[in-house]
């Protein structure tokens, strides 16, 4: 009988210890990266000032897990709203995502190209950002096929015109997708990602010409996340653009 009580007490202590170990965890990000071998996965928090490194871990048979503590000052200041993170194997092989306090993001991807192969679950913003990445890939694949013949015929006006006739509709189609995305998810922070999405330095919205759309996103976000540094930064950007505009265009 005493042995049973002893083992039961040990079990309770183990459960309590496990609970305490996760008590201060704000966000968990875990996953499985195929072909990752024993590469190092790094994690950074994207802020309005840039990027702050948080943690790193070696992939173990492709698996990784980050438990991001609420005690981290960078996190503590920002966990009242969705936070943006970047996971990367190298500078040009990375995943950008968002998570809110209490979420556990789960990721699968191929190490050869994280952005184009990853799948994610566990958070609304994260899933929507994945949709945006998938749509950009769908735009990029046919677009990239036009680059080489364009460069090879840079002085042939007729060939260039034919290629541009294929390229322009692709841009217009993707811009329309982004506009629809913003309309369909007016209360989600992923709208900022849609507004500033780009490909090979090509943006789909111009902050000056599309200022009304940016201000619309800001108005929605400021009601939900008034203390978010991302929202405050975007409001400041919109204000600066408006100040520089001719009065006739305001």
Image (cartoon, rainbow, N blue to C red):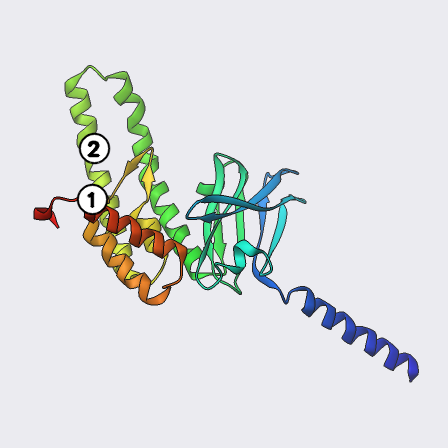
| Residue 218 locus on image (x, y percent) | 28, 58
* Image quadrant where residue 3 sits: bottom right
- Residue at the top extreme, as displayed: 155
Asked whether residue 148 is in view, the answer is yes
| Left-right relation of 98 to 198 | right
| Residue 16 locus on image (x, y percent) | 72, 72
- Label 2 vs label 1: CA separation? 26 Å
Q: What's the mark number on residue 166?
A: 2
- Please give the residue where the numbered disc 1 appears in the rendered image: 208
From the image, state whether disc 2 or disc 1 is nearer to you. 1
Residue at horizontal 86 percent and vertical 82 percent from the top: 5
| Left-right relation of 245 to 37 | left
Q: Is residue 187 above or below residue 62?
A: below
Asked whether residue 177 is in view, the answer is no
| Residue 229 locus on image (x, y percent) | 40, 55
Disc 1 secondary structure class? loop
Mark 2 vs 1, N-terminal side:
2
Residue at horizontal 62 percent and vertical 52 percent from the top: 65
Seen from the viewer's position, the closer of residues 103 and 72 is 72
Residue at horizontal 40 percent and vertical 59 percent from the top: 228
- CA neighbours of label 1 inside 10 A, class few (<14), some (14 to 19), many (20+): some
- CA neighbours of label 2 inside 10 A, class few (<14), some (14 to 19), many (20+): few
Mark 2 vs 1: CB contact within 8 A: no
Seen from the viewer's position, the closer of residues 112 and 233 is 233
């Amino acid at each position: 009988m005493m042995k049973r009580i002893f083992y039961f007490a040990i079990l309770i202590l183990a459960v309590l210890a496990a609970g305490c170990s996760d008590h201060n965890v704000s966000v968990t990000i875990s996953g499985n990266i195929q072909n990752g071998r024993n590469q190092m996965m790094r994690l950074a928090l994207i802020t309005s000032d840039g990027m702050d490194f948080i943690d790193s871990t070696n992939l173990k048979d492709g698996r990784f897990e980050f438990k991001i503590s609420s005690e981290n000052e960078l996190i503590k200041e920002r966990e009242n709203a969705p936070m943006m993170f970047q996971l990367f194997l190298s500078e040009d092989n990375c995943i950008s995502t968002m998570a809110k306090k209490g979420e556990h993001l789960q990721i699968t991807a191929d190490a050869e190209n994280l952005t184009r192969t990853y799948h994610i679950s566990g958070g609304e913003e994260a899933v929507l950002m994945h949709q945006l990445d998938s749509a950009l890939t769908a735009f990029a694949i046919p677009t990239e096929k036009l680059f080489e013949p364009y460069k090879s015929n840079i002085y042939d006006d007729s060939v260039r015109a034919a290629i541009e006739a294929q390229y322009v509709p692709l841009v217009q189609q993707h811009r329309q997708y982004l506009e629809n995305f913003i309309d369909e998810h007016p209360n989600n922070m992923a709208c900022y990602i849609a507004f500033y999405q780009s490909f090979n330095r090509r943006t789909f919205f111009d902050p000056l010409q599309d200022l009304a759309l940016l201000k619309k996103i800001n108005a929605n976000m400021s009601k939900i996340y008034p203390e978010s540094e991302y929202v405050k930064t975007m409001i400041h950007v919109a204000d600066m653009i408006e100040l520089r505009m001719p009065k006739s265009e305001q």
